[in-house]
Image (cartoon, grey):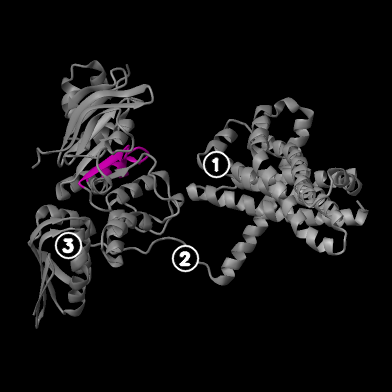
Amino acid sequence: MAQNTSVLEIVKESDGSHLRFSGRLDAEGVSEAWEPALSAADEAKRVSIDASGVEYCDGAGLALLWELQRRGGGEISGLKPEIATLLEPFAEAQPKEDERRAKDSTLEALGRVGADLARDIYEQISFLGQIAVISLKMMRRPRELRWVDVWNTYERAGVQALIVVGLISFLTGLILAFQAAPPLRQFGVDIFVVNLVSLAMVRELGPIMTAIILAGRSGSAFAAEIGTMKVNEEVNALSTMGLDPVRFLVAPRVLAGVLVTPVLTIYSDLLGVGGGIFVMFGRGYPFVTLWRQLIASVGIHDVMAGLIKAFVFGGLVAGIGCLRGLQTKSGASAVGVSTTRSVVTSIFFIVVVDAIFAVVYYAIGF
Amino acid sequence: MEDEAIIQVRGLTAAYGDAVILKDISFEVKRGEVFVILGGSGCGKSTLLKHLIGLYPLASGEVLIGGENLATAESADRQRILRRFGVTYQSGALFGSMTLNENVTLPIEEFTELPATARKVISWMKLRLVGLEGFGGHLPAEISGGMQKRAAIARAMALDPAVLFLDEPSAGLDPVTSAELDALILSLREGLGMTFVIVTHELPSIYAVADRVIMLDKRTKGIIAEGHPRDLRDHSEDPFVRKFFRRESE
């Protein structure tokens, strides 16, 4: 019985199969011939392979001939010497198992996650310590700080974020006012929308939104920038030149983050409250009334409560961005991983720290 | 057939903005030839290679691969021309999120109908050829720079292209691996009739594999020598060329 593809003729006889290859044994021909040839080899007791008609044989053809031999095919007859030469390195070879580490069991995976988490916490605490030590040194010798980098980072993280921070804050204030006004109107107290929007913005939303935007814009940029430097061994170059990467790369960014976040927060507060006032003005309240309500509802301590948080959030976001950058492993994907981790960790800690502030402020009556 | 020019470069000028790197150079690469581009550091070897493979637009001139112009080819023709050659870059340029097996099988998966078992065998063969058998499951970040370079060669050979462009293939390899790579180049040329265009200044490799070399010069921005490396070493009238091949200081 005979079976044909464009490059293969299979003749099945009682004592075995005869495979005759001809023409171009390239990827196209082999795609057709692969399955029939291997099936014939698997089914037959004895296989003979005739390659005398093969004019050209590329890697795919070599793979087919080698696989046929591995599955018990006999000698390949008639193969051109130059093609036979290419098969020689594989003559006695058997594929080795890839040496990659076997997948962890569930228990091992859990243990690994726990160990990684513990190591991460340790590194964060250690990094915090390094920043504290560097900060003290910088206070004593401010000239050692790279002020150009501080200013550049301040500009990138601050000035260039004005539009996005402003727009989001204004719209948040506007949405809050729109949502709060109708229910309060039912009780005839919709003027208190001003209190709600201004207190929410100044004490909570202003600092937290600014910090989250900073985490997404600047924290991730710090992680990507330092991560790429790590991948390119620029961080190693700094170390071997005797320059402390924390002083050189981290300190300017953290200082810029700490300085810029309160400023952006004040800007966010103003725009957010402006959004609320805008809605109430549209609902018919005169501006003077709204202004008096605002002055009466927000005190300087409320602004300070927000700014203290902003100060801490700024350091947190910049520090985490830099830490994730320094933790970057090798490879392009590692930079992406660091960037993602920087944003996720920053947002997580912003919320945790904000919760701690809420409890502390409540306890001390601030 | 052997004398047929598979690559024709006519009046190529390469420039980055106003800075001209190479000016009005012409040469041909014959089918089945191991052709080496060499020259001192910064003379434009890699720049020339990147212009040959269409990564950078030519300031003027033309490059024909198999008689077709990559720069002016329409999308489908361009794909067809690109499949005729494989390239390895100085850094390896492996895809970091993929294992070596996945790197090698990617072009086979994208451009052929070969079943998964065939792709697996081909990947194993290519990796074995470059001495990386058993490392197929590794990510590029998990192996050394030299190994990455070899894996990149395996990937470039995945579709058995007619022409293989190698940018500094031996740099960073130990002498034994480098010699094995030279032997591999010769056996692929012998068995598959593959053409090689290699950018290198590793003299032992040049003597071992090159049929013909061109030597670029930073000052003239052009070709200052062309021929067999041993002939140039022994008979070139240009003292710089002789010194280069004899590894002497200026």
Number of residues whose C-alpha sits closer than 10 Å to that of mark 3, classed few (under 14), some (14–19) or many (20 or more): many
Give the residues drawn in magenta, as a range: B162-183
Going from N to C along the chain, the mark reached first, 1 or 3, is 3
Residue A60 appears at what percent x and percent y? 22, 59
Residue A30 in the magenta stretch? The answer is no
Residue A236 appears at what percent x and percent y? 55, 37
Number of residues whose C-alpha sits closer than 10 Å to that of mark 1, classed few (under 14), some (14–19) or many (20 or more): many
The chain containing the residue under callout 2 comes to A
Q: Amino acid at mark 3?
A: Gly
Which residue is the site of mark 1?
Answer: A230
Q: Quadrant of residue A97?
A: bottom left
Which image quarter holds the C terminus of chain B? top left
Which residue is the site of mark 2?
Answer: A102
Going from N to C along the chain, the mark reached first, 3 or 2, is 3
The chain containing the residue under callout 1 comes to A
Disc nearest the viewer among 1 and 2:
1
Residue B90 to residue B140: above or below: above
- Label 2 SS: loop
Asked if marks 3 and 2 fall on the same chain, the answer is yes
Residue B89 appears at what percent x and percent y? 35, 41
Residue B234 appears at what percent x and percent y? 17, 22
**Figure disc tally:** 3
Are discs 3 and 2 less than 8 Å apart at CB?
Answer: no
In the rendered structure, the answer to whether residue B140 lies left or right of residue A302 reads left
Q: Quadrant of residue B171?
A: top left
Which residue is the site of mark 3?
Answer: A29
